Image (spheres, helix red, strand yellow):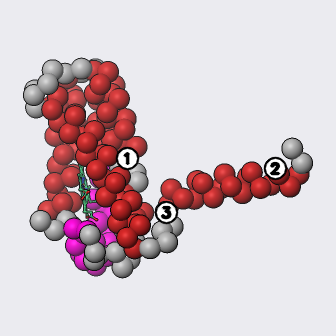
């Protein structure tokens, strides 16, 4: 590989990692991105909920796998709450941008709790897992109450 190729490769890697902090061409793209991330997170969180609530038997491996996905997905939606994306196919309330510090705090809380949830799931201890699930679910509800339209 010559020098130019090497530089180009580094540039494209940098561009890829930047896309995580999300530059969106259109408001609709940001809305679609965050809803997709929330949907994936919600699906895996739902599988954890089924175990936490005893609708399916506790399975430590499945709990750990799903909780890892939730903890990773929990990082993604927030960069897509770009200014000017409170209308269209979205339930995001304008309060997100009026009270942005409070919104960020709610997102941080979810991320912190989801890391604890993953740790509890990896411990294989059902009681710790259930408690951590309840704590994490509380962060979903409180943000939805404040920032998501019905
Ligand atoms: C920091 C605030 C916040 C937290 C924390 C949060 N959400 Fe949400 N969630 C939102 C907002 C705002 C929307 C609406 C997004 C939109 O319509 O653009 C939403 C939408 C959703 C949706 C619907 C996505 C769609 O396609 O319309 C699901 C599912 C969801 N959240 C699941 C969860 C789960 C599960 C948790 C906790 C593990 C959680 N959320 C935590 C703010 C939050």
Q: Residue at x 40, y 73 (%)?
A: 27
Check if residue 141 falls in the magenta segment.
no
Q: Residue at x 21, y 60 (%)?
A: 143
- For the question of whether residue 94 can be seen, the reply is yes
Q: Residue at x 88, y 51 (%)?
A: 3
Q: Residues within 10 Å of mark 1 (few under 14, many from 20)?
A: some
Residue 22 falls left or right of residue 71: right
Residue 76 falls left or right of residue 89: right
Q: Earlier in the sequence, mark 3 or mark 2?
A: 2
Residue for badge 1: 73
Stretch in magenta: 90-112
Q: Secondary structure at mark 1?
A: helix
Mark 1 vs mark 3, CA separation in Å: 14 Å
Question: In the rendered view of the protein, which quadrant contains the C terminus?
Answer: bottom left
Q: Residue at x 16, y 54 (%)?
A: 141
Residue for badge 3: 22
Q: Secondary structure at mark 3?
A: loop
- For the question of whether residue 78 can be seen, the reply is no
Q: Residues within 10 Å of mark 3 (few under 14, many from 20)?
A: some
Q: Earlier in the sequence, mark 1 or mark 3?
A: 3
Whether ligand 1 has any atom under 8 Å from the Cβ at mark 2 is answered as no
Q: x, y (%) of residue 84?
A: 36, 79
Residue 127 falls left or right of residue 25: left
Q: Earlier in the sequence, mark 2 or mark 1?
A: 2
Q: Report which quarter residue 14 is drawn in.
A: bottom right
Q: x, y (%) of residue 25?
A: 49, 72
In the image, residue 121 above or below residue 86: above
Residue for badge 2: 6
Q: Secondary structure at mark 2?
A: helix
Mark 2 vs mark 1, CA separation in Å: 31 Å
Q: Is the residue under label 2 in contact with that under label 3 (CB below 8 Å)?
A: no
Check if residue 94 falls in the magenta segment.
yes
């Amino acid at each position: 590989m010559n020098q130019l190729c090497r530089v180009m490769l580094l540039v494209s890697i940098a561009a890829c990692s930047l896309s995580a902090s999300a530059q969106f061409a259109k408001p609709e793209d940001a809305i679609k991105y965050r809803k997709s991330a929330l949907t994936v997170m919600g699906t895996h969180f739902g599988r954890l909920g089924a175990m936490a609530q005893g609708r399916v038997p506790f399975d430590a491996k499945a709990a750990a796998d799903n909780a890892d996905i939730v903890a990773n997905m929990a990082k993604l939606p927030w960069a897509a709450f770009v200014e000017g994306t409170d209308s269209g196919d979205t339930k995001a309330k304008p309060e997100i941008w009026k009270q942005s510090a409070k919104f960020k705090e709610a997102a941080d809380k979810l991320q912190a709790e989801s890391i604890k949830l993953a740790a509890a799931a990896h411990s294989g201890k059902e009681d710790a897992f259930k408690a951590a699930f309840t704590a994490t679910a509380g962060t979903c509800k409180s943000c939805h109450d404040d920032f998501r339209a019905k």
